[in-house]
Amino acid sequence: MTVVRFAPSPTGYLHIGNARTALFNALFALKTGGQFVLRLDDTDTARSTQKFADTIQEDIAWLGIKVDRLEKQSARMARYDGVRDELKAKGLLYACYETAEELDYKRKRQMALGKPPIYDRTGLNLSDEERKELEAEGRTPHWRFKLTGKRVEWNDLCKGPQAIDTASQSDPVLIREDGTYLYTLPSIIDDIDFAITHVIRGEDHVSNTGTQIEIFEALGASAPQWGHHNLLIAADGSALSKREGSLSLKALREEGTQPMAVASVATLVGTSMAIAPRESLAALAEDFDLSKVSSGPARFEPKQIADFSAQMVHALEPADVADTLEQIGVPNDLQADFWLAVRKNCNAPQDAEAWWQMLNAQSVESNLENDDVAYIQTAIAQLPEGAITSETWGVWTGALKAETGRKGKGLFMPLRKALTGMERGPEMGPIIVLLGRDKVLDRLEQAAR
């Protein structure tokens, strides 16, 4: 069975780039009938918080992603320590004592000599006595994994055949001087223990893959299949600005953005799949194929999400926004008529509040032109008798056109301004039904004074 994972660190909010990776994994699982593991990489105890962990789970649920298994790395430290000791015993994890400054000097010297800046394995060749002397100086080691230096190949689900010669890479640091783990080792142990079959992530991790495959092999495990998708860039080809790149899912959620607008854009940009809003993750999964991910970067602009979201909001039914309408005070018996009247003028469900306030205001500023005042007086006289219905607007404006000769903007705009205080907005037929005859007359009379 296919098992994928999304592994954010709860040190901040998820952003649109994170959403792309999460969705690629979720859609791959949907397409293959597999499972989605959410793994919280919370070993950075200084920066990880429960608040961020909770928000990540809320964001994932908001996107419609079903989590089949939730894991936290902080609960698995004993397991990591056991594997650490195993690698040390095999001679595959060795202590190094250089400071950051010394390592930087080595890199610069190698580059000045025209050599690649690869770690020279000084730590591997230290004698026991030399180690004792370094520790007596107060040095604490960091620990590197000993690479074989072989050519590592894999068939990338997004990029096709790939190869890395690990002889061209430094032995990776797996454990810091303070004993904490970098990302690599715990992630590989988790992938083994959770039976992860496919690792789908950003292409900025391609260069790490050869190293990671060697560690899988050192632990006697088969590496998963790999897929490295392209990264988001701004529409003009530049790097994402702070605003675009850090567009948090939490902020989008709170703004009333529709989750499938985010999912559609985050998934489809930078692929050969048509960029259009999809109604569900299941619908998105139907066309989803990692081989359709472009080799070039994915051009993204926030306006795409806003436009898709507005389209989706305009199509929402009253039941879809019932909670929002209740929060802004719309009575249950008016919710359907009210929402259907204003939804085309709402880019988010909560935008309906402004229209509800307009309907219930004691008065509005009509700002009529002088020659429109007499027209409004005529409109009062021509308002059909009885309760206002869905037919009233057409009958009323027809009578006014015949009486005054006005048409188009001259016919409709003064009425809109007198009744709503605005020059644009929802169709007036449903609006005057919601206002009711008494309020329509009251606003017309105020405007005609």
Image (spheres, rainbow, N blue to C red):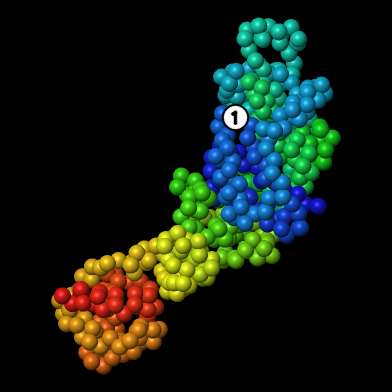
Depicted 329 relative to depicted 73: above or below = below
Q: Position of residue 142 (x, y in %)?
A: 67, 21
Depicted 254 relative to depicted 403: above or below = above
Depicted 420 relative to depicted 128: above or below = below
Image quarter where the C terminus lies is bottom left
In front of the other: 364 or 53 = 364
Please tell me in which quadrant of the rendered image residue 412 appears: bottom left
In front of the other: 400 or 223 = 400
- Residue behind mark 1: 45
Q: Position of residue 194 (x, y in %)?
A: 77, 42
Q: Can I make out residue 400 in this image?
A: yes
Q: Which amino acid, by three-letter code, is at mark 1? A: Thr
Q: Can I make out residue 173 in this image?
A: no
Give the side of residue 349 with respect to residue 119, left or right: left
Q: Of all residues shown, which one is farthest toward the bottom?
A: 402
Q: Residue at x 29, y 84 (%)?
A: 408
Q: Residue at x 53, y 68 (%)?
A: 319
Q: Residue at x 21, y 77 (%)?
A: 445
Please tell me in which quadrant of the rendered image residue 435 appears: bottom left
Give the side of residue 416 with respect to residue 113, left or right: left
Tell me if mark 1 has few (under 14), some (14-19) or many (20+) residues whose alpha carbon lies within 10 angstroms of its own.
few
Q: Residue at x 55, y 58 (%)?
A: 259
Count of labels shown?
1
Give the side of residue 222 with respect to residue 333, left or right: right
